[in-house]
Image: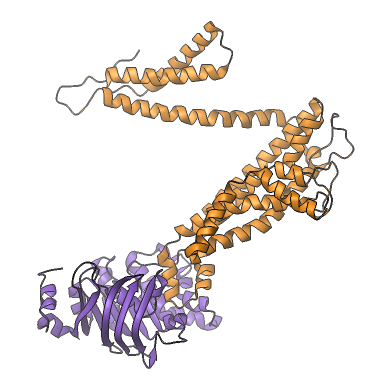
Chain colours: A purple, B orange
Amino acid sequence: MAKRIDVGGLSAFYGAHKAIEDISMTVEPRSVTAFIGPSGCGKSTFLRTLNRMHEVVPGGRVEGKVMLGDEDLYGPGIDPVSVRREVGMVFQRPNPFPTMSIFDNVAAGLRLNGDHKKSSLADIVEQSLRGANLWNEVKDRLNKPGSGLSGGQQQRLCIARAIAVQPKVLLMDEPCSALDPISTLAIEDLIGELKEQYTIVIVTHNMQQAARVSDRTAFFNLAAIGQPGRLIEIDDTERIFSNPSVKDTEDYISGRFG
Amino acid sequence: MSTTSTLARPGSLQGARLPQWAPWAVAVTAVAVAVAVGLAAGLHSRVQWGLMAAVLFVLGTYALSAKVEGRRQAKDRVATSLVWVAFLLAVVPLLSLVWETVVRGVKVLDGYFLTHSMGTVADAEPGGGIYHAILGTAQQVGLATLIAAPIGVLTAIYLVEYGRGPLAKAVTFFVDVMTGIPSIVAGLFILSLMLMFDLQPFGFAGSLALAILMMPVVVRSTEEMLKLVPNELREASLALGVPRWRTILKVVLPTAIGGITTGVMLAIARIAGESAPVLLLVFGNPFINANPFEGAQASLPLYIYQQYVNSAGSTAAYDRAWAAALTLIAFVMVLNLVARGIARWKTPR
């Protein structure tokens, strides 16, 4: 189910401005890869190139290759809509659809794509909510609006919504930055469970979080404001946090800058 | 006329304050003085009395407050009283208009009046009704809405969701220009088409002119509502692999539907009172014509105008005109209330 991601020589632009430059890396299936680095270094931009959400922004443009399994996401004839069904995404701020109930929020991906049977929908919703560790909290109020949940519950609802369409890869853009420590812990536990099935990429500003949840860590940095962000190094999380091979990484992790 | 309720202690944070009833006392005094001066000087216009009272109120408040509370408090009170004066200036004409219409309109407004046409009742005689005009207004406005609402909403969707570059700028510009079109010009535009094709006046021609007037209002309000939908919702939907058109249809529009409906309702309320294009294109008809596509029709604004103009000063016709005006105001008010109700009901919580 999970797929490997191979990125080669990837640059992304906002209009004429180059946001990230020449990034190459491999993301292993059934593992958690964390992106760390100072604000504005292009972590989120890079994450959004992995499911072609970058081009949703006016002027957004990408050069280079992103191989999902054996397909190039930016190859000719690739439909961004199908890419996004394979590569799901969880955003920084919980964003459940305000007009929909909890059930409808989870079912949204399937319903809006029109490929569902009524009988299996309830099963998929339950599975996804269980998968997101939310089922027990909401099973009695599936018809209530999703915006009535707490922030942490909303974020898990968004995760349930993302895994309901059964993607191969799950991208998370600072999923805990708007949450309290308890909710953060719930989501981190969930990430640990989800990696059994999915390839997970997570952007985080919290280095302890990267150390706790990820198998591999990539450090991004930019030479100066206005310069494009670059990948400094990617390695096993343990090695990045104990004995990184680049001085900048060590400085960043030990808090000497950024 | 008033004293401080508490005396200031030196070095205390508590300053001298006018008592709660002071502004009311100033207001009453101002009105009394204004009325006295008005009577003494033989001023007949109540507007002059009111303006005098307003000026006295503002000046009195400032003088009293500056003496007791200090300059800063005085400025604060003057600003507050200016806001109140402005509010009254805005509301008084509105209330007096509604009051006048109700008082004069209820005389002949009854079941018979609402369910009968003028038929063969002569303009100067009592009797008759406005059923034909209500029917005409409902049909013309309904058809105009059927044309303008979908085009307007779709244009707004284009502008907000897809519009980039010169085409979107041009559309925005022309929508702005259309907002400013006087209603008589929209009427003349359709009239020129009517003359070109050698047509006689009919209800739908009026609908077309009304649609021209309604469209920019719908575009504007819908645009604002769509802009209020958080971008995060669009991204959330797109990231689920939902195509753009479905995202707009199933996520963006439902989120904004309350506001969009309100906008359309207000646009309807605006065109329901238009008389110029109807005068040119629908012509007016004392008989019931239920077919908007053939033959002259009546409409409420047009009926009011014609009762006034054609009646040669007959009281019966004036009463009918006021009753029709009251009906029209009631219709617009009901639309506004419905719009508010829908907005409240559909707002995502």
Q: Please say if B105 is above or below A120.
A: above
Q: Please say if A224 is above or below A35.
A: above
Residue placed furthest toward the right: B120
Determine which quarter of the picture holds residue B44: top right
Residue B80 coordinates in the image, percent (x, y): 38, 29
Q: Residue visible at 33% across and 78% down? A: A171
Q: Please say if B262 is above or below B101.
A: below
Determine which quarter of the picture holds residue A39: bottom left
**Which is more toward the observer, A223 or A205?**
A223
Task: Report the side of B209 relative to B342 (left or right).
Answer: right
Task: Report the side of B252 relative to A15 (left or right).
Answer: right
Task: Report the side of B198 relative to A92 (left or right).
Answer: right
Residue A53 coordinates in the image, percent (x, y): 39, 75
Residue B287 coordinates in the image, percent (x, y): 86, 44
Task: Report the side of B173 relative to A208 (left or right).
Answer: right
Quadrant location of the N terminus of chain B in the rendered image:
top left
